[in-house]
Image: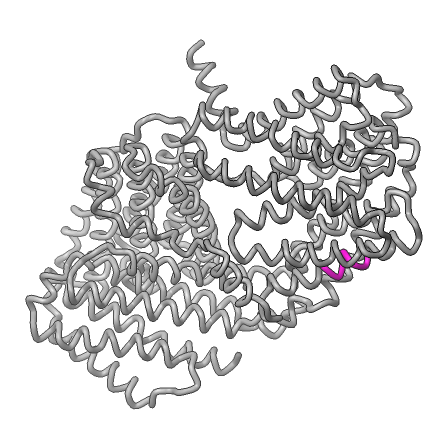
Amino acid sequence: MKSVFNSLRLQWLNINMLHVLAVFISTNIAAIVIWQLEISHLAMPLVLGIIATALSEQSNRLMGRLKDLILMLTAFGIVSLVSQFFLTKGWIFVPLLTIITFIVVMLGAVGGRYSKIAFCTLLVAVYTALVYTPDVVWYINTTLILLGTLIYSFISLLIYLCLPNRATQESLATYFDTLGNYLQQKSTFFDFDDINRLSDKKLALAKANTAVMRSFDEVREVLFSRLDQQHHHFHTQKMLRYYLTGQEIWERTSSSHSQYQDLLEEFQHTDLVFRLRRLLELQAIECQYIAKALRHNFDYKPNFKMQRVLKGLQNSLQYHQKETKASFYQLSSMVENLKNITLLFEALYEENICNDFGKNNQQTYRLLSENISGIGNIFHTIKKQCHLGSELFRHAVRLSIVVFVCCSIVQIFHLELGYWILLTAILVCKPNYSATKKRLVQRILGTLLGVFVGLSLRYLSPTLEAQLGIIVATSSLFFFFMERKYSYASFFITIQVLVSFDVIGLGKEMAILPRILDTFIGAGIAWFAVSFLWADWKYLNLRHNLEETLKSSSLYLRHIMAQLQFGYRDHFGYRLARRMAYHNIAKLSTTVSAMQEEPKKYKNSLAVAPQLLELNYTLLSYISALGTYRKESDKINNQFEFSTIFFQQGKFISRLLDSTHSEIKLPNSQLNDLITQLQHLEQDYLNHEKDKSRLLVQQLSLIVQLLPEFDRYVKQL
């Protein structure tokens, strides 16, 4: 019985189901209030308040939730009252809603918190226009919207107080899941029978890296939103430890100590590569096991089979050492790196987080310091986005035009419930063409089926109780499918809206044909806007992405060289540089993926884009490998002659990376001289594998070998 209960708890008490549960309870309370007080004509604004609040929920600490509640009550109340007032003034409502649209979209520059609340504020304005009737007292709809906001916020707060750490653990679990997938993808590199597909595997690994980056950003926001108030709390420190360990595993896994094809060809008749792959696969499984432990709230214990596999790999490495193959030392370094990853897993199990952990990592809390606060900073951030090169600004202008056109159509033709066109348009219109096209198809399919089902229910003559039950069920199912299958979500929310109109007494005006026509018109306007108003393919700039990636890679390299020279410190500046390097490579990967979805529009760029992504990812892997030696700083600096030359060359290489994307090019003779110096230095330290000198020089050589290719691609772009 206990196992059945645990299974049920683990499967259903995830963060998405808790969100749906809050909606289900809140809409049930609203339904009971409507039924008991016999105020069915006021049902829609009350339920709208619940839905708008649920869509904007995001904070993961008590004070953040209370601040969001105050912000939502203020924004929803003002917009609802203003919309109602100007709806009676004819054309004045059109420019008003257009201006509101531009403002709420541009608030997305400030951060996800403001963006969600702002968009839901726009939805409140549209729904207010849909449900407005002149015979209702002016403050009633607004009051009910705010009451719905309070009901949902109260229920959500109760659930949060029962499970305060659930969101943090879920986010960390997702992070380790994607990290496990990344390790699994990396293990496919060590396959003798698939050497010719290394390029495809690198592209797949870059996409897996993008997924890790996305989940990393999410967990960073969730975790660090708690640190202001709770950084001395044991659980918060424990989660922070998992987060930082995940970062370290990611960096070490991303590192590359050699060219894989040469390595595979050289060791194809040994068991070494097979053992490497086996260890990586076990480490991938271990990441997924950590994710399971976090989700299911039990203590993580490592699988000590990794130690046996690692021991077997080390024994095999020692056995083959006498063969003195050219790539042996790179392979030895890879084994050492995998050993350190294994030790990181064990450290999570063995180390107790002491009370001094927070004190020794105060700079860690600054990782979210770019979160913007203060009116001046907010205006400055928005101002920086006000140019056509910004996707956010283009979307704000485009969506504002869409709102203006839709509202004008309603005013010109005096359409009853014509704001359905506007509702469809703003839900379909996304910042880029590919996302809009996908959302458009899903929205039309879901809405069409929802209109038929929703309006057909009227012929069953359901009672008020049945209608309220349908509203509760469809509202809950909308949130259940919203992240999983948007077409299903559209289907259920369409039924919910139609039944709500029937409950408030406007059902007779909700004919099937006009609603279908409104859906097509709204979707068509959205498609036209993203296709012809500042279309993506005119602004998607591969060269700009390349420049940003090279700049951040150069900065990352400089931070690594500084730590190798002046001592290991896992400080804020280094982690920020590392995060920006990974963020920009993920951004480049997203750009390439967007191009591949529309091959006809990006035909010229796609001739080089995949190769460019592969090259950038290879560069980052070589730099990351250098980062794994930061703890060897003392040993490196003890070799005065070596360290003097090594650090000088490392800094020069970072300048070469900067010059690759700039108009001021360094002479080829300097690059040739550098290659010669590195070759001589590598020969001088040929037998210094124990002190890492040779391996460090080889990493610099691998980076330098990529520079001519970067130069060639920059010229092509």
Instruction: Give the overall secondary structure of the magenta segment.
Output: helix
Write the residue at 36% across / 67% down.
Answer: 553
Relative height, residue 458 to residue 687 (above, below): above
Residue 371 pos. (x, y %):
44, 53
Residue 534 pos. (x, y %):
69, 69
Q: Please name whichever residue, 657 or 237, is drawn nearer the observer in this view of the structure.
A: 237
Whether residue 567 sits left or right of residue 198 in the image: it is left
Whether residue 383 sits left or right of residue 662 in the image: it is right
Write the residue at 18% across / 58% down.
Answer: 568
Q: Please name whichever residue, 148 or 653, is drawn nearer the observer in this view of the structure.
A: 148
Residue 267 pos. (x, y %):
27, 58
Residue interval drawn in magenta: 400-405
Q: Please name whichever residue, 645 or 76, is drawn nearer the observer in this view of the structure.
A: 76
Residue 30 visible in the picture: yes
- Whether residue 401 is in magenta: the answer is yes
Whether residue 85 sits left or right of residue 104 in the image: it is right
- Whether residue 339 is in magenta: the answer is no
Write the residue at 25% across / 64% down.
Answer: 560
Residue 127 pos. (x, y %):
75, 41
The N terminus, quarter of image: top left
Q: Please name whichever residue, 608 or 200, is drawn nearer the observer in this view of the structure.
A: 608
Query: In the rendered image, which quarter is residue 28 located in?
Result: top right
Residue 17 visible in the picture: no
